[in-house]
Amino acid sequence: MSRERLPLQALPAWMSINDATLSDVEVKPINQKGNGLVAQKNSAGGGGSPLLTVPHGLVLSTEAVDEYAKEDKNFSQLLHACGHKSPRHDILLFLLVQLVLSSTPSDRVCLPTPWTEYVKMLDDEIPVPTLWKESERILLHGTSLEPALNAKMLALAHEFDEMREKSSDIECWNVAFWDSGLVHLTDWYLVDAWYRSRVLELPKSGPSLVPCMDMANHSNDANAYYEENLRDEVILLLRPGSNVEKGNEVTISYGSEKSAAEMLFSYGFIDESSTARSLRIPLEPLPDDPLAKAKTHIFNDPPTVEINEVGGTTVWTSAFAYLIALNEEDGLGFRILQDKDGGRELRMFWEDEDVSDKSDSFKTLISDHELCDVFKLRANMVVYQRIQEQLDSMSLPVSDDSTVVPDTDNIGSSNAANARTLRRIETEILEKAITTLENQRRELLALESVTAYLGSMGASGGGSGEDQEDNDEFS
């Protein structure tokens, strides 16, 4: 939507009016980082006064949204009709309303708040993938971020459509949002991007947006941290032992364990100095498995493969792979039983024991089975095949559509550069995982219990043990 904008130079006045204070730091443009906090003098951490203090009344949390609803009847109607789904969703509704208020100052449907002016200083261009051009998003093909981004775009569209349907029944919001033609799906994308790239998890207030604090950039070697004090103010302090020279940036940590895909998805950049090397990809049951639907239905968590580099060693984990690896003849079974309320529910059994609540624990459940190593080999091959598929997908041409630039080298944007970086990092992780899986498989195939099983299966099937390695038993 078209909205009034304020320059960053308006921030000090806004802070003064709203009792927020900066001490010995200022907000300035940072090369290739947007805006950031810069020290105005040499400072040392440990017992000093806060660099930034934001009063509780400026913190945008679910509590703040609820308080605003108590003060404004129109917003209360909107929140009642469309909100109370999650802290994120309520905050997005609030931000959307502030966008509308900042766009139509002479015809306000709600009471203005300090955030009505603050959003005028927030950027429209945020480098998170949900705001990328299609020619940039296509560069994520084959990465672990691709399915997550597709799911996010669909979810945002669904949220927007639902909000539109419900708010259209409220006359004042139908006029403010829809009859005016002011609000569009791209505005919902924008407020979601603001939230995702700026949200802080506060000890008392929970997920919150904190004005001015959200100007602090990330560093893997952060020199500052934030907390809530006894007056529920949010304050920024230098870390003990940190020394910041005049003109240097004051930074916080957005999370040292987040993967490259997570950082790009939430914040729009990749910290290549981070030692965290991990990724997660979805895992589906085998297409010819007669128990596939039952396994998917009863599994408690999202079925994935997670790969991490720990101390120079590549480790994979996938609870679902162990469930995929088991068949009815191994002792796995499913039954439809009557529940306590007289309804019917699917239950899962392992060797006649009800393990419906342990679907993510099969690596442990099979540990004392005589074919444990065989099951491990099956799980290994399931994961190997999935990772190889991911590598193959990443090596394919980006797009066959002539309207989309398929060659990442021909796109010079920072978004394209981030996509290339993600592809490189994830390719390296996947290739190391392939090597790890191959080594593990060789070790398993050398075990007597495995060779004996393969030999027996080969004999019963009329083939050799080596041929049996590629049998459906191990698909």
Image (tube, rainbow, N blue to C red):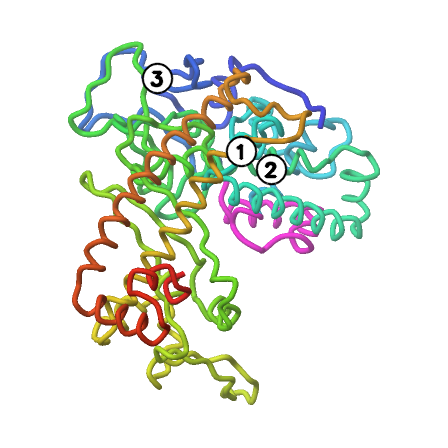
Residue 85 point in image, percent of width and height? 58, 55
Few, some or many C-alpha atoms within 10 Å of disc 1 (few <14, some 14-19, many ≥20)?
Answer: many
* Type of the residue with mark 3: Val
Q: Residue visible at 42% across and 50% down?
A: 386
Residue 136 point in image, percent of width and height? 57, 27
Residue where numbered disc 3 is placed: 25
Residue where numbered disc 1 is placed: 194
Report if residue 413 lies within the magenta region: no
Mark 1, secondary structure of its residue: helix
Residue 250 point in image, percent of width and height? 31, 21
Residue 133: quadrant of the picture: top right
Mark 3, secondary structure of its residue: strand
Horizontal side of residue 302 vs 172, given as left or right: left
Whether residue 19 can be seen here: no
Q: Which span of residues is magenta-colored?
A: 60-89
Circle nearer the N terminus (1, 2): 2
Q: CA distance from mark 3 to mark 2?
A: 27 Å
Residue where numbered disc 2 is placed: 95
Q: CA distance from mark 1 to mark 2?
A: 9 Å
Whether residue 463 can be seen here: yes
Q: Quadrant of the C terminus?
A: bottom left
Mark 2, secondary structure of its residue: helix
* Type of the residue with mark 1: Trp
Few, some or many C-alpha atoms within 10 Å of disc 3 (few <14, some 14-19, many ≥20)?
Answer: many
Q: Residue visible at 19% across and 24% down?
A: 242
